Image: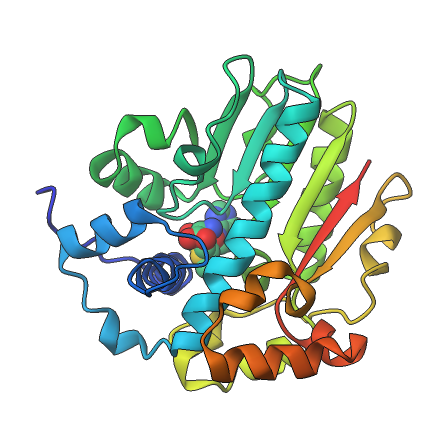
Amino acid sequence: MSEHMVPNFPPVQASLWLTLCGRALDNRLPQPILGDEMADELVRKLDYDYRKLNIPASSAIYIAHRARKLDEIARGFFAKHPNAVGLDLGAGLDSRALRIAPPPGADWYDVDFPDVIEARRRLLPATATPHDIAADLTDPAWLADLPSDRPVVTVADGLIAFLAEEEMISLVNRIIDHFPSGEIAFNGYSTFAVWAQKRFAGASTIKDVTKFPGFDDPRTPERWNPKLKLAREILCTREPEVARFPLGLRLANRLSALSEGLSRRGNVVLVYRF
Ligand SMILES: C[S@@+](CC[C@H](N)C(=O)[O-])C[C@H]1O[C@@H](n2cnc3c(N)ncnc32)[C@H](O)[C@@H]1O
């Protein structure tokens, strides 16, 4: 397949276009929140028609913002554990390893379905994917060959909406059973966010494949495994990057930031430790 041919994915995999294009659009803003040049370059190279996704500017900024928070979490973990294993679950066409530059003693793995991994190999530079794993994350076998004697930092950006709650719980349990210790971080989905994702025009491509019910109490995952403890709840409305949002969005975020409940309905990144 040519380097410029747009892969034709089934709906769950196709969700990666929303996040990739969201980061590319953020990069084209006068003050990008993430500044993901590789996403921008890839969307241009493929001449991907992002307009058909109807991504509002606010969504592009939120996608970039949560990616930035997950990058910070991974970087922070590697600063403390330079020999750690990093996992990006449902990596899509994201080149997170290029942004965070894991230390030489660390190992970074991008996991996604085989057709997505094939597209990564074709479309992204090899340095974007230090290691890849072509697997369905609900299949218990994919973890077997990973080192099990080093701490792990796991990020899942935009993934969990596509897993049923039991699938997410099993996945988290398998990671906790495999590694001695670590962090698991993902963008949260409140029950309101799931409701909105199933109706909102910008998300029309993913509404039929959204399976996760969402949760409103950040401590809910502590019930998935007794070792799992909430380490941090990042309410993005209260993060410093909001100062760089365009005026209207900045004001809306400043107002939401006054209420924990409202902030929890929006862009949230959750970090758990085990
Ligand atoms: C919204 S996209 C996000 C992609 C990437 N994290 C990003 O931020 O651009 C969700 C990704 O999760 C992957 N995914 C969903 N369910 C999966 C599963 N059961 N196994 C492996 N990958 C899965 C999809 O293929 C897709 O690439």
Q: Quadrant of the N terminus?
A: top left
Q: Write the residue at 53% across / 19% down.
A: 103
Q: Is residue 207 left or right of residue 9?
A: right
Q: Is residue 215 left or right of residue 223?
A: left
Expressed as whole percent of the image width and height from the top left, the position of residue 175 reads 70, 34
Q: Nearer the viewer, residue 210 or 42?
A: 42
Quadrant hosting residue 190: bottom right
Residue 122 to residue 220: above or below: above
Q: Write the residue at 44% across / 53% down.
A: 34
Expressed as whole percent of the image width and height from the top left, the position of residue 273 reads 80, 39
Q: Is residue 207 left or right of residue 70?
A: left
Q: Nearer the viewer, residue 90 or 170?
A: 90
Q: Write the residue at 39% across / 62% down.
A: 31
Quadrant hosting residue 6: bottom left
Q: How is the protein colored in the picture?
A: rainbow
Is residue 138 visible from the viewing direction of this image? no
Is residue 108 visible from the viewing direction of this image? yes
Quadrant hosting residue 18: bottom left
